Amino acid sequence: MAQSNQSVRKYVISIAFVTSLIFTPILSGKVFANAGAGASEGDISISESNLSNVHEQEAASLSEGTKIQQGDISTTVEDIQKELQEQGYYTYTIDGVFGPLTGQAVRDYQADHQLQVDGIVGPNTLETLVLQEMEFSGNNLTITEFSSSDSNIPSDIVAVAKSVIGTPYVWGGTATEGMDSSGFINYVFHQVGIDDVSRTHREMWENNGNYVDHPSIGDVVFFEGTYDTEGASHSGIYIGDNQMIHTGDDGVRVADISIAYWQEHYLGAKSFIE
């Protein structure tokens, strides 16, 4: 299973991806005959969910003392170079090597953003680099850029899932204009760089990820018999405390899977992260 080093630090998506959506057509429903609408039983509001706790954990993880500095060689450094390049601070080769040129770009960035100028990407610099919020003209959406880290993929998965809550159900849909239940799973994992996820619930259950005895945040929970098809017929992103984000008849919502309906149809859980 491929895993990205990108990390979504907030609840929204990058400008580059929003732009790409304009040119992404909704695929034909005939291809996805087994996608399934699923049900909306147990759906709850965001205020009733545990999402605030999930993101408090994410913020704590971000501030635990991560430091990226001269001498480091990693894909994380590569992504930082890309981010600095996009913002005009780094004009050299993207090579994942934190050398003097990268250090100078970091110092220039820090000086312009009232940060301690030490050339080290610590929690404050990383937060500022990652959490830059911008207005997307036309839709008045606050947008946060993607940034680097492969250490908190489960929270990234939840962040992407939350960013599309309210998206309407569209049979065969896999984009923010509308998505079906398995299209939602595909969309979320694509956004965190996991692209080899099957298109239907049944195929995901049979072919993707690893089975787990109990779901953890960011895992996929599966259900069977939610409509007339063999095998897994529905799934959602587990966010802890017996809650999931899924696409039901009313679109992308948070649901309480401890209610009788979901418990009766529960099939199991898988992790799509290696």
Image (cartoon, helix red, strand yellow):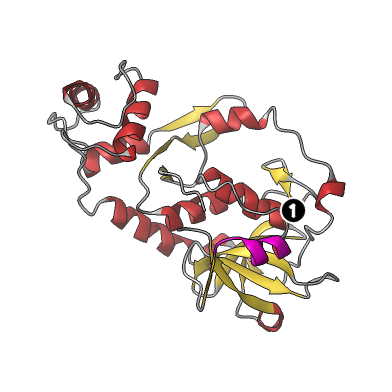
Residue 116 as seen in the image, left or right of residue 170: left
Picture coordinates of residue 270, whole percent (x, y): 55, 68
Q: Nearer the viewer, residue 52 or 188?
A: 188
User: Residue 205 magenta-drawn?
Assistant: yes
Q: Which residue is mark 1?
A: 180
Q: Which residue corresponds to the image point at 22% horizontal and 48% vertical from the top-left?
A: 66
Q: Is residue 11 shown above or below 205?
A: above
Q: Nearer the viewer, residue 167 or 221?
A: 221
Q: Main secondary structure of the magenta part?
A: helix
Looking at the image, can residue 42 be seen?
no
- The tally of labels here is 1
Residue at 52%, 39% in the rendered image: 13
The quarter holding residue 4 reads top left
Q: Which residues are magenta?
A: 202-209
- Confirm whether residue 273 shows in the render: yes
Point out the image quarter for the C terminus. bottom left
Q: Is residue 91 above or below residue 272?
A: above
- Type of amino acid at the residue the image marks with label 1: Asp
Residue furthest to the left in view is 118
Residue 266 location (% of width, % of height): 66, 78
- Per the image, is 50 magenta? no
Which residue is drawn at the image coordinates 14% and 28% (left, top)? 117
